[in-house]
Every structure is written in structure tokens, then in C-alpha cells.
Image: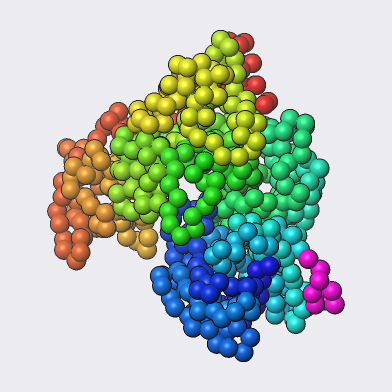
Amino acid sequence: MIHYRIAIADLHAHRFEVTLTVPAPAARQVLSLPVWIPGSYLVREFSRHLGQVSARQGSREVAVHQTAKNRWEFDCSGRGALVISYPVHAFDTSVRAAFLDAQRGFFNPSSLCLRAHGKESLEHRIELADLPSSWSVATGMDRLNEKADAASESGEGGSWLFKAADFDEMVDHPFELGSFWRGEFIAGGVPHEFVVSGALPVFDGERLLRDAQRICEAQIAFWHCHKSKPPMDRYVFLLNCVDDGYGGLEHRASTALIAARRDLPRLGQPETSDGYVKLLGLISHEYFHTWNVKRLRPDVFEHYDYEQENYTELLWFFEGFTSYYDDLFLVRSGLIDEARYLKLISQTFTQVLGAPGRKHQSVARSSFEAWTKYYRQDENTPNAVVSYYAKGSMVAMALDLSLRSAERASSLDELMRALWRDSGGGPISEARILARLTELGGEPLAQTLSTWVHGTDDLPLPPLLERMGVRWGTDKPTLAQRLGLRVAESDGALLIKQVLLEGAGLEAGLSPGDEIVACNGWRVRKLDDLVLTLDHVEPQRLSLLVSRDQRMLSLSLRLPLHDSAAKPVTLGPLDKAPARAQGLRRAWLGS
């Protein structure tokens, strides 16, 4: 087997010490560290956190040759085990890499564990050592009870031992270390564990368990229709609570989550805050990935290449369709009502329709270019990029409503389950998706989906929602929307972050990084201060004093009328909706 001993070397220096044992090494044994982690499409260069690599066979030191940024080669002699040691600095608070301090530890094996080339199919084991006596371990990886942990469940000097069938399975299991809250529930006959680190004392753990259980049971029933068990024997949620943060990363039998601790449910407060709804949506999203991307996945992801980008045009399906179902399962499981759901999706519509990038990039292209554009956002992102998450969810909704309202009624639910059955829960292609859709909804709808995915036109959601008895409306735009600006108000300064194409701000000559100092002769500190300075003679003209790279500029901006600006979308029940529309809406939302 391949054996990793991961020890805590120094909590305050945030350092793990890794010792890797490779049996029967090749004469020129190659090892490498992944440059990315599946589910997060950016080359992250984890090897930059590794210290000096040393190696030995028995008592003999082995020469180490670093041949690339993340690759090492070792001159071995004979078949004696190769033992490699190296420190790893761990201070990434995200769900993607590794973190260690005096309160908690966390790591994805992809950021700590070198891959022994030619040995990937062997059993891989991880031994955790030198943990503080009060710490516990949570992971979805199978645990063995063969080592010193028989004497101490989690004591210093003891160890924890885990096994995976191969390298791919090992790197798909994150680890949470520390003194955390832990709860359990059963869903679909499968044990589920929920681990929460960093929660406030008023955290209502029992409510979180009840609500997560409802989501999991609804999704298991969705995929398996009570006819078969979920594709995992156990599932673990690893939630790290911080002052400000949000995100998640899916794995085959677990997920790593990060959220603001103020968004957790609180004892004695039965209401459901917007922050808690956001957290429940994240839980729903990552759990749905258990099927849609971890198993049902792009055919090019059948075997990952951990040393370079893995391109696909299908993230609109695997991330976008998952984004459609995440909040939909909140209303279907009764955690939010219909009105709140419509408010959530209207926010998504507003986000997409308010960004010019939707006119310049398709969701298929956005998927392919995720490595260089979506995950490397800058001041021009809203002008050049469309989110395959957000617009992908709109594509899913447009497809679902088209299927439901057709003469031969079907649904996206049926399509998802059919693809699962067809592939055996494995790789699929766009051609397979379109072929199955043709069987369910006809060739014209399949051609329409291809146009939506590879084109840049807006989707016909207003009439489709009307068929469900939902009214599409718009609200008064904010001042930022009228001006085509995205700003930051900080410490009494009004800073321009992004300037949208075809907006008044661009026409006036404003640029990202500008600070608006004054308007019409008055000092301003917030965007809304601009309207307080309007001249009654020419109220649409703003004379701006702008600071740019220590220079003061005078710019003239014409305030556009409301009708010319992007408007927030509002959704609500259609007055006196026909009975068929009401029935379709109930079937869609599961209410």
C-alpha cells in the first residue's frame, strides 16, 4: 500500500509534516502534487506550500531531483521502500486546500499528498499523528482501528488510520480536525454526519440536522424514487463557520462548506433568516452534486489529469442545473414558501440580466473558459463573462418549464433520472443529453436547448413562467444600475469597482479604481449622495470631481432615465391564473 503519515509539526507555524512510504519503487520513481482540485476549476499551484523534500531507502539517502514546479524524481536502488518527508505550510481558510492553527485543522489530500506515479491503483492509507488530546477527526474516508488509537481515541502520541481503494478515492475525502460540534441523522437508510467548527454558543444544531435531513431525503427520493439506495454508505458534511465567508466543494461521500457563523440557526429563534436560507441552499447544492458531477459527470472527467487543466463545455449542466435544483429543493421540502422561492430566483435573473457579459459569452464557452475567466475575475468580468452557475440555472428552468407545459408533458426531473439510468451513474456527453431530451420533448426542443447553451440570446422565461401562473415584472432600478456602475463605499470613500458597457458611467469616462470625491460642488461619501446634489435647473447633469492615481479629474455625467437602465426582476403569482397554470405550478414546486 501507499502510506502517508500526516503529523502536526507546529500549530503556531501552521505546519504539517508529511512522511510518504512507497513500496517497491521504480528505479527512477516519479512523484507529483496535483495543481488543482476537482470541482474548483483553477490551477492553484498547491506545491508552492511544500518545503524541502528529502528521501531515503533504509539508511541510505536518496537523491531528489525536482523536474517541474510540482514534480520530483528519486534515484532508487533495489526494491526497498522509498520514504519521503516534507513540511507543508497550511494557512488557506478556503475549502480547497489546507489550514492549521491552534483551534482547528483541515486539509484536502490533493494539497498535501504527493502522487506516486505507477502506484495510483494501490490501496492508499492516511495516518494522522500528534494531534492535540482534545481534538477529533471527521472525514468520509473509511477508518481502520489497527494503530495506537486503540489505546486512545484521540490522544497525543496516538494516531488515526484511514484507507482508500486508490489515489482518486483518497483525494476525494477532505479531513476536519479539532474540537467541533457533531450530529447525526439517517436519510434514505444511509447515516449522515454533520460536523460544525467555529459556531457560536447559541447555534441550534438540532434544527440544522432536521432541515438538512429534509433536504437529503428529498434529493434521495428525487434520484432513486424509493427504488434503490443512494450511491454512498455514509455521508459527512464538514462546515467551518467564520466571521464572513461562503462556499462549498463537493466530494463523493462528503462536502466541505464555509459560511458566516451569524447565518446559522439560533436557539430560541424559530424564524428563518435570509442568511440561513443561503446556507440551506449551499447544503442543497453540494449534496445534489453527489449525483450530478461526482458520478453523473462530463465524459472528459472520467479520468482526471491532476497536473493540468481539464476542459469541458458542460459546466452549465453540472453546475448550472445543480444551481437550479438547490433552492428548488428548499421549497419542495417545505423549508421555504413559494413567495420566498420566487424572490430568490428573481435575484438570479437580475444578476444575469444586469451584466453585459451575457451578450458576449455563451454558457458553453463560459464552462470551457472557467480556468481563465470565471475563476479569475477582475474589473472587466461583468462585461466579458456570463456565470455558468446563474445563467445555467436559468437554462435549466427554461427547459423544465418548456417540458412541463408541452402537450406531451414531461419534466427536467425525468430527464435527469433518465440520464442517471442510461449512464449507470457515470460519464455523459452533450450528445447524450440532447438525445435523451429528444426522446422526452422532441427534436425541436433539443435544438432549442443547443441554441440556448451555445448562443447569447436572453431566454424566454417571462412567457414560460406565465404558463406556470407566475407574473414577470420589473422594479425601479437602483442608482448604481442606472449609472452602470458597481461601487464600494468604505471609510467615507466612494470607489468605482466596475464600469459596465453601454452605461452612463462608461460614457462619462469613469474607470475602475476611481474615487468620486465630489458632485456638483458637494463632497460625497456614498453613491446616494449624488442625488442630493442635483441642480433644479439641469437635474440630469452631474459634474463629478474624481481622483485617479493621485490626479484630480473633472467629468460630466448625464443621469439616464429609469427606462434606459437595467431593472431588477420581480416575480409573483399571476392574478386569476387559469386552473391548468396553478396545477402546473404546484407540480413544479412540489407544493
Bounds of the magenta span?
A: 144-153
Considering the whole magenta stretch, tell me its main secondary structure: loop
Residue under the image location 61 percent in, 11 percent down = 580
Report the side of 357 relative to 1 (left or right): left
Report the side of 325 relative to 230 (left or right): left
Farthest residue, direction bottom: 59
Viewer-side residue, 168 vs 450 = 168
Report the side of 298 relative to 142 (left or right): left
Note whether residue 241 is visible. no
* Count of numbered marks: 0
Farthest residue, direction right: 151
Report the side of 265 relative to 537 (left or right): right
Residue under the image location 44 percent in, 65 percent down = 45
Note whether residue 65 is visible. yes
Q: Is residue 258 above or below residue 429?
A: below
Viewer-side residue, 295 vs 140 = 295
Q: How is the image coloured?
A: rainbow
- Residue 525, given in percent of the width and then of the height, sits at 32, 56
- Residue 436, given in percent of the width and then of the height, sits at 55, 24
Residue under the image location 27 percent in, 47 percent down = 499
- Residue 260, given in percent of the width and then of the height, sits at 58, 57
The image quadrant of residue 414 is top right
Residue under the image location 46 percent in, 70 percent down = 71
Viewer-side residue, 591 vs 38 = 38
Q: Is residue 430 above or below residue 50?
A: above
The image quadrant of residue 16 is bottom right
- Residue 51, given in percent of the width and then of the height, sits at 49, 79
Farthest residue, direction front: 78
The image quadrant of residue 534 is top left
